[in-house]
Image (cartoon, rainbow, N blue to C red):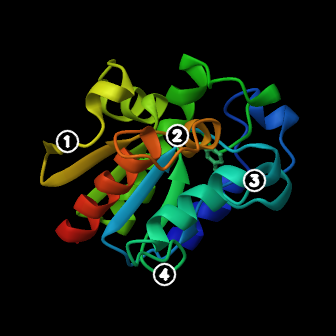
Amino acid sequence: MKLEVLKNKCTSCVKCTLSTTRNNVVFGRGNPDSNLFVIGEGPGQQEDEQGLAFVGRSGKMLDDIFLSVGIDTNKDCYISNIVKCRPPDNRKPLINEVSECMPWLTQQINLVKPNIIVLAGSTAVESYLGIKKPISQLRGSWIIKEDIKYMPIFHPSYLLRNPSKEKGKPKWLTLEDIKKVKKEL
Ligand code: URA
């Protein structure tokens, strides 16, 4: 099955109640032939309105950090989220929402076949890998599972709240993490 076919199916998903409050299903954006896959938490308001992943302020932050090491998020990676519909008031997705939505993500990943997956924020790490630890402890170190290398990073919304570029601060650390990703690519 092609990614476009999967997207069409996903667009009519009503498996959980997030489908009743969404404007658009946010399936993913970027290059489906890429080796790099980025997983966020879930769409925010901008993403819900436009039907595209990471296009609001967090997305701009993500784009800028990736671009600073030469990764264009539309050409050099594919970006999606743990849940494809916006949780009301940007709350964290609930356990049942994550589990109902997960088959879409696993099928996406099976089709894109990335070697590297960047997990943005603790919700992505916990939901996808089942690892429940603070992101400050996980970020920056590769996790290898079934031939895929996973790099946990701070969620870009956290970087928006902590904008200092000073050495050792979250934004500086994230740039170091993305440099590791670039090197590995
Ligand atoms: N935050 C996310 O985790 N994903 C998006 O697509 C936008 C904001």
The residue at which mark 2 appears reads as: 82
Q: For the residues marked 2 and 4, what is the alpha-carbon distance in whole angstroms?
A: 21 Å
The answer to which of marks 4 and 1 sits earlier in the sequence is: 4
Pick the front one: 17 or 147: 147
Residue topped by disc 4: 75
Residue 53 appears anywhere in the view? no
Mark 3 or mark 2: which is in front? Answer: 3
Q: Are marks 4 and 1 in contact (CB under 8 Å)?
A: no
Q: Which quadrant holds residue 179?
A: bottom left
Identify the amino acid type marked 2: Ile
Considering the numbered disc 3 on the image, is that residue within a helix, a strand or a loop? Answer: helix
Query: Where in the figure is residue 111, as x and y percent of width and height?
Result: 38, 65
Q: Is residue 154 above or below residue 100?
A: below
**Rounded to the nearest whole Å, what is the CA distance between mark 3 and mark 4?**
19 Å
Looking at the picture, how far across and down is residue 49, in whole percent? 86, 54
Residue corresponding to mark 1: 141
Q: Label 3, on which residue?
A: 47
Q: Is residue 9 left or right of residue 78?
A: right
For the residue marked with disc 4, what is the amino acid?
Answer: Lys
Sequence-first disc among 3 and 4: 3
**How many numbered circles are shown?**
4
Q: Earlier in the sequence, mark 3 or mark 2?
A: 3
Q: Earlier in the sequence, mark 2 or mark 4?
A: 4
Q: CA distance from mark 3 to mark 2?
A: 14 Å
The residue carrying mark 2 has its beta carbon less than 8 Å from ligand 1:
yes
Q: Earlier in the sequence, mark 2 or mark 1?
A: 2
Residue drawn 69% across and 45% down?
43
> Nearer the viewer's eye, disc 2 or disc 1?
1
Q: As shown in the figure, which amino acid type bears the numbered disc 3?
A: Glu
Whole-percent x, y for residue 48 in the image: 80, 49
Name above or below for residue 150 compared with residue 17.
below
Tell me how far mark 2 sits from mark 1, CA to CA: 21 Å
